[in-house]
C-alpha cells in the first residue's frame, strides 16, 4: 500500500510541467522583489526573505490549514477521478462542431491548411475571453446562490493569503467549476474547429491557452499578502491587489472584483471596486464560524453539511420551518 502511494507521488512529480511552474514562481519572485525595492530602503537577502515570508502570515492557523489542505488534495484527487478542465471543453467543442457541421452540411474545416500565426493569436484571445467571462459568471453565482456559497466559503475562509491559498477550493466546487467552464469555452472551441482548426490542433493549442491564462492572471501572486497593482493597466487586467479586495472582510468590498484575468467584466456589470494603493486589508469571512474552516474536517465535510441543509430547505420548506421552531424553543 505504501509503495503504491509512493509510486503515485513519483508519477505525479514526473508529469509536473516544470516550465510552467518555473514561469509562475519566477514571476512571483520578481513581483515580490519589485514591491520590496519600492518599500524598503536598507535591503538584504535575509530581510527580503522575511518580507516575502512574514512570520505572522506563514505561522498563522489559516496558513497551516492551507498547507494541510493542499497536501491532502494532492493525495486524494487521483482517487476522486475528477476530469481535467480541458476534458469538458473538448467534449462541448466536439458537440458544437457536430451540431454546426450537421446543421449547415459542413465537411471539415472551412479554411484548409495549417493555421497561420495571426489566426492562432485571434484564437488564443477569443478562448481567453470565453474562459474569462465563463469564470466571472460562475464566480458571481457562487456568491449569489446559497448552496454554491457554502462550497465557495472554503476559499474565502482563508484569513491570510499564502500563494497556495489559490488551491483552497473544495473538490466538489472544483468539479462543478470545471463542468461549467466547459460550456462557454467549449462552444467557442467548437466554432473554431469548424472554421479553421481540426480538433487535434485545437486541443494542443487549447492547453497552451490555459497555461497562458495561468501565467497572465498571476493566480499564485494574487493569493499572497503582496499588494501589487498595475497602474493604468488595472482597467484591463485584474491586478493582485484588486483581487485581494475580493477576499476582504470590509463590507464595502463584499461581492466585488469577481474577475479572473480581465477587470472590465466587473466594470461593465457594476461589481468593480478600486482600492486605495495604501489600503490595508483583512481577509476571511464575516461569519462567526470562520474558525470552523481551519481544519481538514471543516474544509472537506462542513461545506457538504451546510450545502445539504440549503438543498433540504429548498425541497422541504415545511420540515425546515418546524426544525427552526424546535431550535428556537430549545434555546429558551
Image (cartoon, helix red, strand yellow):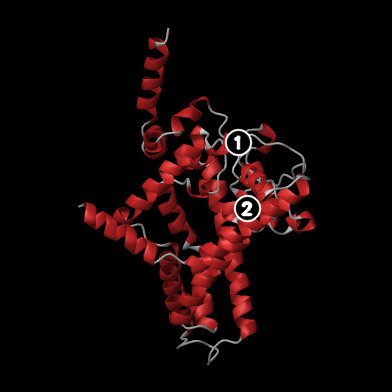
Question: Where 115 falls versus 192 (above or below)?
Answer: below
Which class describes the residues within 10 Å of circle 1: few (<14), some (14-19), or many (20+)? Answer: many
Pointer 1 residue: 283
Residue 179 visible to an observer of this rendering: yes
Q: Residue furthest top?
A: 332
Q: Nearer the viewer, residue 169 or 295?
A: 295
Q: How many discs mark residues in the rendered view? A: 2
Q: Earlier in the sequence, mark 1 or mark 2?
A: 2
Q: Nearer the viewer, mark 1 or mark 2?
A: 1
Where does residue 268 sit, x and y in percent of width and height? Answer: 71, 54
In the image, is 198 to the left or to the right of 127? left
Where does residue 136 sit, x and y in percent of width and height? Answer: 59, 53
In the image, is 97 to the left or to the right of 44? left
Quadrant, the C terminus: top left
Which class describes the residues within 10 Å of circle 2: few (<14), some (14-19), or many (20+)? Answer: many
Q: Nearer the viewer, residue 186 or 99?
A: 186
**Label annotation for residue 136:** none
The residue lying at 60 percent from left, 87 percent from top is 116
Pointer 2 residue: 259
The residue lying at 48 percent from left, 49 percent from top is 167
Amino acid at each position: 500500500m505504501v509503495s503504491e502511494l509512493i509510486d503515485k507521488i513519483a508519477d505525479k512529480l514526473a508529469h509536473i510541467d516544470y516550465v510552467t511552474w518555473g514561469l509562475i514562481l519566477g514571476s512571483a519572485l520578481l513581483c515580490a522583489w519589485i514591491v520590496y525595492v519600492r518599500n524598503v530602503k536598507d535591503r538584504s537577502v535575509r530581510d527580503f526573505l522575511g518580507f516575502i515570508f512574514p512570520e505572522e502570515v506563514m505561522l498563522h492557523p489559516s496558513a497551516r490549514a492551507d498547507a494541510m489542505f493542499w497536501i491532502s488534495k494532492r493525495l486524494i484527487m487521483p482517487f476522486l477521478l475528477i476530469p481535467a478542465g480541458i476534458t469538458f471543453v473538448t467534449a462541448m467543442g466536439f458537440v458544437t462542431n457536430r451540431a454546426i457541421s450537421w446543421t449547415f452540411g459542413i465537411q471539415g474545416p472551412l479554411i484548409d491548411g495549417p493555421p497561420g500565426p495571426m489566426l492562432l493569436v485571434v484564437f488564443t484571445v477569443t478562448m481567453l475571453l470565453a474562459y474569462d467571462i465563463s469564470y466571472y459568471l460562475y464566480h458571481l453565482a457562487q456568491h449569489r446562490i446559497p448552496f454554491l456559497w457554502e462550497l465557495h466559503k472554503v476559499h474565502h475562509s482563508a484569513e491570510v493569503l499564502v500563494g497556495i491559498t489559490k488551491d483552497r477550493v473544495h473538490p466538489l466546487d472544483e468539479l462543478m467549476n470545471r463542468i461549467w467552464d466547459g460550456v462557454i469555452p467549449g462552444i467557442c472551441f467548437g466554432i473554431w474547429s469548424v472554421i479553421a482548426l481540426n480538433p487535434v490542433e485545437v486541443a494542443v493549442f487549447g492547453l497552451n491557452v490555459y497555461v497562458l491564462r495561468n501565467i497572465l492572471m498571476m493566480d499564485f501572486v494574487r493569493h499572497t499578502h503582496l499588494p501589487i497593482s498595475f497602474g493604468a493597466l488595472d482597467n484591463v487586467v485584474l491586478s493582485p491587489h484588486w483581487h485581494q479586495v475580493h477576499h476582504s472582510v470590509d463590507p464595502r468590498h463584499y461581492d466585488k472584483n469577481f474577475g479572473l484575468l480581465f477587470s472590465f467584466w466587473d466594470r461593465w456589470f457594476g461589481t468593480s471596486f478600486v482600492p486605495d494603493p495604501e489600503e490595508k486589508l483583512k481577509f476571511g469571512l464575516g461569519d462567526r464560524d470562520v474558525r470552523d474552516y481551519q481544519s481538514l474536517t471543516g474544509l472537506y465535510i462542513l461545506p457538504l453539511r451546510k450545502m445539504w441543509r440549503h438543498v433540504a430547505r429548498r425541497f422541504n420548506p415545511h420540515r425546515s420551518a418546524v426544525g427552526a421552531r424546535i431550535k428556537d424553543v430549545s434555546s429558551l
